[in-house]
Image: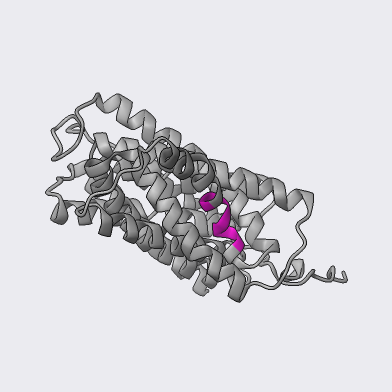
Amino acid sequence: MVAEAPRPGQRPRSARAGPIGHTCGSVIAILGGLATAVLWATTLLGSARSARLIGSWSTLGWVMLIGLAVTVPLIVFTSPPVVLEQREIVYLTVAGIANSGGLLLVYTALRRGKVGVVGPIVSTEGAIGATLAIVAGDAISGPALAILALIAVGVVLAAIDRRAADPVEDAAPVSSVVTALLALGGALLFGINLYATSRIAADLPLAWAVLPARVAGVIGVTIPLLVLRRLVITRAALPFVVLVGIAEVAGGATYAWGSRDSAAIAAVLASQFAGIAAIAAYFLYGERLTRVQVVGVATIAIGVGLLAAVQAL
């Protein structure tokens, strides 16, 4: 079959990977997914602290503004001119709204609950994104599918915390059920964003994959807060919002890079950020994991190792 000639800045569709385990491209999906996990863990930890200092709305407003300031120069200097088709405009719009809405829900949950509880619930976005990608036609081998299921089980176990109602420093007291529902809502929106982002990355330069959420966030959150004079910042929160703003952009870019070759693998491996953040929160914030959560984190780690081995065969 003759590949369709790409538009300027667009990858040929024939360059996308085939079945998992049959191309070396899956290695890119693994590397992209793991890099994204580290960056998203950083954003989770930083936004938890910031949301408890200045609130979830101001945190989102500053993160989106800083992210846009980083993204626009990337597009100007690294991306050739592109002509957007209707399908791509739809994906860009969906990704922007879903990502911004998901971040707001997650920041609100982090202001109320533990990183070790919110993170694992939010990380189910990987399973949601992978499911959407597979339903849409991404090829996947039997062993890899079984390993993805194992990782998903680990994510569920990591989300179980019978001490979820324990007080958290600087956090607003609220029912653990409300916190869980907020985190789950964020996961659903993030899953939609992951799917849309993988489609954007297949056709457009990487910088375009991280642009939608920044534009949507600035228009829908930052500007209204500025007009209402409710966009607040403190000296203590400033380094955290800067860190989160940059890491969000970098994480979006690494995920887009990995998803070009396998959206399913990149999405599930990126969900490792929950385990990384939970462990870091233990040392940084004094949060403790239950035995079930430890089993969940270990299951995720084993699944990742097995998946890497399958791709190396």
> For this rendering, which residue is in front, 313 or 49?
49
Question: Would you place residue 230 above or below residue 32 in this image?
Answer: above
Q: Is residue 24 visible?
A: no
Q: Is residue 27 magenta?
A: no
Q: Position of residue 248 (x, y in %)?
A: 42, 57
Q: Position of residue 181 (x, y in %)?
A: 37, 29
State the count of labels: 0
Q: Position of residue 242 (x, y in %)?
A: 33, 59
- In which quadrant of the rendered view does residue 264 lie? bottom right
Q: Residue furthest right?
A: 2
- In which quadrant of the rendered view does residue 124 lie? top left
Residue that appears at 69% across and 73% down = 80
Q: Which residues are magenta?
A: 208-214
Left or right of 163: which side holds 72?
Answer: right
Left or right of 76: which side holds 100?
Answer: left
Residue that appears at 44% across and 38% down = 227
Residue that appears at 14% across and 32% down = 166
Q: Is residue 87 visible?
A: yes
Majority secondary structure in the magenta region: helix
Q: Position of residue 179 (x, y in %)?
A: 31, 31
Please state, as top left, top right, bottom left or bottom right, where the N terminus lies in the image: bottom right
Left or right of 208: which side holds 163?
Answer: left
> For this rendering, which residue is in front, 78 or 176?
78
- Color style of the picture: one colour
> For this rendering, which residue is in front, 264 or 148?
264
> For this rendering, which residue is in front, 284 or 291?
284
- In which quadrant of the rendered view does residue 239 lie? bottom left
